[in-house]
Amino acid sequence: MVDLTADLGFLKLKNPVLTASGTFGYGLEFAPFVDLGRLGGIIVKGLYYGPRPGNPPPRLAETPSGMLNAIGLQGIGVVEFSEKILPRLRGLGTEVIVNVCGGDTDEYAAVVEYLDAQEGIAAYELNISCPNVKKNGQCPALRPDTTQSLVRAVKRSSRRPVIVKLSPNVTDIVEIARAAEEGGADALALVNTFLGMAVDLDSRRPVLANVLGGLSGPAIKPLALRMVYQVARAVELPVIGLGGIMTGRDALEFLLVGARAVQVGTANLVDPEAAVRVLQEMQDYAEHHGLARLADITGKLEV
Amino acid sequence: MIMMKDASAVLVKKELKGAYVRFTLESPGIAREALPGQFVMVRVSETGHPLLRRPLGIHARRGTTISLFFNIAGLGTELLSRKQEGDRLDLLGPLGRGFSLGPPVQQAENSDLLVGGGRGIAPLYFLADELHRAGHKVRVLYGARTSQDIPFKDFFQAACWETIFATDDGSFGFRGFVTLLLQQELEKKGIGRLYACGPDSMLKEVGRLAALQGVPAELSLEARMGCGFGACWGCVKKIRRRGREEWLKICEEGPVFQAEEVAWDEG
């Protein structure tokens, strides 16, 4: 029997498979297809304080081995989430992590303050890296100073651990990771989507109404893997790896380069059983290779 | 609503005509639960490209099988069209909220009119069958660009309900848009309810004509979809409900909406 547990320090997960925010709805959408209790944790769709309308359609474009999205964080807000969704997530036997959004520092703090009063949340994931809510993909995670000050402000108001989700759309990911660490982050999750675009040659128009969107799916895996590798070597914080994970082997590669847990994202949209299947494939691999603990593979890359 | 993944739906019959394809699949669970207007998400590739499943309306149900009707419009549907009888397909379904059948119309002269444009005819065959079975008087108006774009005419002609065909170029049936045919039908009165599926321009006109005549209409909308089951918020359209307009998910709140709910001008 393989020991699947993953230790993030502030949180012990029964296994290292989490679901990436924005690809798993509020979790319940997947209940018809999978036993949510098998997952290490669910990271629910990003929440602003109030409901958000999101961007006009078209919001999706399919690209080679990937997809672009510009949803724009449409969502129900903290009150409806706490009243209608959270009670149904408690007791599923999986950790619930809420992805926290804000238009400014005050809103991030207000979301955390509201959610701090609710039970059944294991941690927050600070969304400072969505490329689809400001012009030209702007977000706090593009600069070390805005990353650090925002993380510090949220950490001050939160009673729960804070995972900081980083953007890959930067020149030096390590610099941003260190800024988040300096600001008091409890863990780092990377990467969010890559800013990209798709055009329709015949109509000479962008495919997405938002013009730009975030690229995800297997197309980005090598880029994501590289960034997780660089960051895991440079910081003390636990790192959660994500970006294009479709299989157990993909997930194990992220552990190998230093991640302690992984998030399955776009794969959930293609196959609602993907996250559970990824876990099963990781377990099968470990059994086949005589690994006593999945965690033993973390950071064991031989360069 | 019960939805499921059937990763081994056997393709029992494949009919190919030009760029149009009809699949009949053995999928007992999905067939049992399916309601007219619902759809399935079909995996088209195992290699990660194209990545996303394709949404296809459930075209017909016979016992433990469902049929799908689609045209080859890109790489995804092209790959799908290459599947052979005996191959297994990976489906999610039945998904979405379908048409409301309502009680059979009281007066014998009142009938349900179904308006389909192009590949939008797909879910209307299933709907016509179910309405007919429930004692409704049903007629289908089936419009397409040319005779070539109505590839499986016999299938409709053999049904227990009547189909009136229209082509833009007059190569088969009525000459002109199906909405022109609809306008003539509506003038004859006796229409209890309208159901439509097709391109947005057609649906918008159906909604307008229905409102003019005071006939209730349900429209099945189409959108590019990510997941098909409400997780990604990718497939929204602007819908007006309780005096408020918002982006609603086609896959979960639809694909069928009341005609007056659809806010066309805002996208």
Image (cartoon, coloured by chain):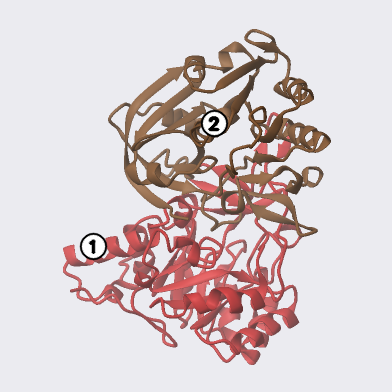
Chain colours: A red, B brown
Question: In the displayed image of the protein, which residue is found farthest to the front?
Answer: B107
Residue B9, by quadrant, is: top left
Q: Which is nearer the eye, B132 or A104? A: B132
Q: Amino acid at mark 1?
A: Tyr
- Mark drawn on residue A285: 1
Which element type, helix, strand or loop, lies under badge 2?
helix
Q: What is the x, y in percent for residue A55?
A: 72, 56
Q: What is the x, y in percent for residue A250?
A: 36, 58
Q: Chain of mark 2?
A: B
* Above or below for B10 versus A96: above
Q: Which is nearer the eye, B183 or B236? A: B183
Can the viewer see residue A259 in this picture?
A: no
Q: Which residue is located at x 52 percent, y 60 percent?
A: A23
Q: Chain of mark 1?
A: A
Image quadrant where one finds the C terminus of chain B = top right
Which element type, helix, strand or loop, lies under badge 1?
helix
* Above or below for B135 versus A44: above
Q: Which residue is located at x 57 percent, y 92 percent?
A: A159
Residue B41 placement, left or right of B141: left
Q: Which residue is located at x 64 percent, y 71 percent?
A: A141
Can the viewer see residue A24 in this picture?
A: yes
Residue B107 placement, left or right of A278: right
Residue A37, by quadrant, is: bottom left
Q: Which is nearer the eye, B134 or B254? A: B134
- Mark drawn on residue B128: 2
Q: Amino acid at mark 2?
A: Ala
Q: What is the x, y in percent for residue B31?
A: 39, 41
